[in-house]
Image: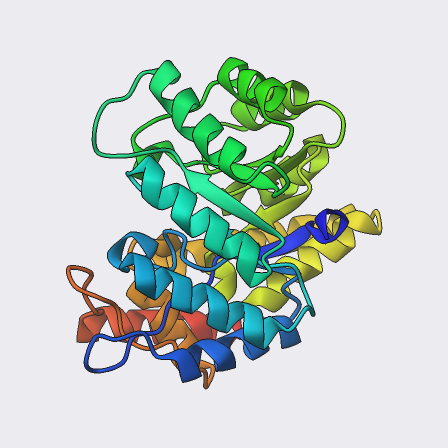
Amino acid sequence: MLDKIHGLVCPMVTPFDEAGEVDHRAVRALVDFLLANGVQVLFPAGSTGEGPLLSIEERKALAETVLDQAAGRVPVIVHTGTLRTDESIALTRHARDAGAAAASLITPYFFTFTDDSISDHYLAVARAVPDFPLFIYVFPGNGKHDVTAGLLARLRAAAPNIVGVKSSNPYLLRLQEYIAAGGEGFIPLCGVDGLMLAGLSIGSRGQVSGNANVWPELFRRLYDAFCAGDLATARACQVQIDRLRAVVQDGLHPAAFKAGLALRGVNGGRVRAPMRELTPPEAAALAAGLKELGIV
């Protein structure tokens, strides 16, 4: 299914119910909403999905629900990164056995690690699942650590099942360096929505967009326009994406995505503490902004 990993990749929000538990019925409905509106790859339990706030067993159950509801319609990349190498291996093995197309792992966070420590972590996971595709998930803003192009090249050479990168580094040059370092068959994915069109123009295979939870059609429209060579439409879509980013604060609060979904008639659920819900003024501003954009 690696050849199908392209286009619009959505890191799904995770709906929680009033008791703070994962609402699996809402997860299933969200899967159907996203696929009906153009999402080409699903990505549960990432930062948008509040993955680090889930227990290991909750993450396994979430992956199983998403995979079951997707039912092979699109590839599913499960986020399996944790602070601990043994837990990352356990989650990655589970994702493989549950039928995921690949796993993506954020760099170990909180502590300060050397490049050698990060390399050892990824290689331990890769060697535990040698036939299962892995993506390096680089998000310096959340994961604390960057991954240089040189380190990526080392990892790729040592573990052929490291097949791609999800880059949430705001510097386009870094994505370009990853593309060069990855070589033939590598799958670079851009994780910065303000760089979607720019990323595609230099070789990104797709956009990993948390904002697409709210308006997936817009991101799919940009991707399709780019593939068709319609740059005028693609540029217009990028302008709209940047307006959307401002309205939902680019995912600063996952509650904004969930509130946006609710305005579209989709149950995005609540957030899990210590995340917070939107204040009434924030919710009103969000509703007004989405109405102005024509989404609701």
In the image, residue 215 sits, relative to residue 284, either above or below, namely: above
Q: Is residue 277 left or right of residue 119?
A: left
From the top left corner, tell me how far across and down residue 101 is, in percent: 63, 53
In the image, residue 37 sits, relative to residue 115, either above or below, namely: below
Kindly indicate the quadrant of the structure image that contains residue 182.
top right
- Residue located at (37% from left, 68% from top): 14
- Residue located at (45% from left, 82% from top): 266
> Of residues 134 and 9, which is closer to you in this image?
134
From the top left corner, tell me how far across and down residue 139 is, in percent: 40, 36
Kindly indicate the quadrant of the structure image that contains residue 16.
bottom left
From the top left corner, tell me how far across and down residue 176 is, in percent: 61, 24
Q: How are the colours assigned in the image?
A: rainbow
- Residue located at (60% from left, 60% from top): 99
In the image, residue 142 sits, relative to residue 178, either above or below, namely: below
> Of residues 55 and 137, which is closer to you in this image?
55
In the image, residue 221 sits, relative to residue 110, either above or below, namely: below
Asked if residue 123 can be seen in this view, the reply is yes
From the top left corner, tell me how far across and down residue 83 is, in percent: 28, 39
